[in-house]
Amino acid sequence: MNSNPVLISGAGPSGLMMACQLAMRGIDFQIIDRTSDHTTQSRAMAIHARTMEIFQQMGLSDEFLAQGQIAKAAQIYFSGKKAMRAEVSQLGKGLSEFPFVLILEQYKTEQILLKFLSGMGHTVQRSTELLSFEEDNSHLKATIINHDTNIESAIEADWIIGCDGAHSIVRETLGIPFVGTTYQQSLFVLDCKVSGDFGEAEADVFYSNNGIGMIFPYKGQYSRVIGLL
């Protein structure tokens, strides 16, 4: 029986941030993830002011600013005609040292947090998935499986933290509802090079009777393109 005060299920940005915060406070933990490595996809790309403030507390805000891009403005089009341009780089001026949205691909966020965690002497236990857990008044017992060896093992912990996504075993076991609704429309998401008269660090949003399209530029040559199928 492996014993840890805290078991974190899931090593995406939420799980990694939780692990970093525990490591900073000297609290022992074990963090597991069923994937063999961090994501290589862009996925979540917007980092808001409060998150940047926490990164600053961790000494990471400069690295995020160096790798990301501050969104300067949003241009809105209706039926092919530009309707308005809104400056967004100072939306929270006077409220935060980071009064903007920082655009950064999720895999880069995970790389920064993993590097920080490694510097604190911790690693993610990869290819490892939470199968089940049960609890009593004092602690819980969890069953995990390592997909590389196909070996199941038991973990005893005081706390379990579910950072394992929309289909969370932790959430489902505890009967916590997944609040929200599912869009009926189907969307496509594409990272690509975009040619045309688009401003640097400016988002473009296109509305028409047939749907909506959006372009969000990353730092560098690529942009996120979203639209309705």
Image (cartoon, rainbow, N blue to C red):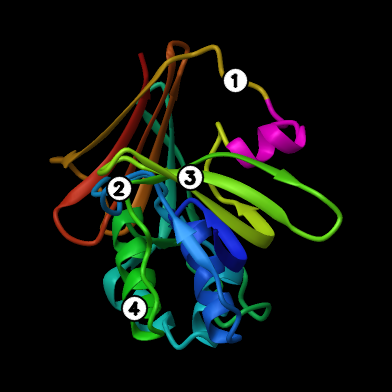
Q: Nearer the viewer, residue 209 or 187?
A: 187
Q: Which of 187 and 37 is in front in this view?
A: 37
The mark lying in front, picked from 4 and 3, is: 3
The residues bearing labels 4 and 1 have C-alpha atoms spaced at a distance of 37 Å
User: Which numbered dot is residue 182?
Assistant: 1
Q: Does residue 163 sit above or below 15 in this rendering? A: above
Q: What element carries label 4?
A: helix
Question: Where is residue 5 drawn, in percent x and y?
Answer: 64, 69
Q: How crowded is mark 3: few (under 14 residues within 10 Å), some or many (20 or more)?
A: many
User: Which numbered dot is residue 173?
Assistant: none
Please report the bounds of the magenta region as a residue range: 169-180
The image quadrant that residue 172 belongs to is: top right
Q: What element carries label 3?
A: strand
Most extreme residue toward the right is 137
Residue assigned mark 4? 118
The residues bearing labels 2 and 3 have C-alpha atoms spaced at a distance of 28 Å
Q: Nearer the viewer, residue 126 or 92?
A: 126
The residues bearing labels 2 and 1 have C-alpha atoms spaced at a distance of 22 Å
Of callouts 4 and 1, the N-terminal one: 4
User: Which numbered dot is residue 42?
Assistant: 2
Q: How crowded is mark 4: few (under 14 residues within 10 Å), some or many (20 or more)?
A: few
Task: Please state which amino acid type lies under the numbered disc 2.
Answer: Ser
Question: Where is residue 156 drawn, in percent x and y?
Answer: 62, 58
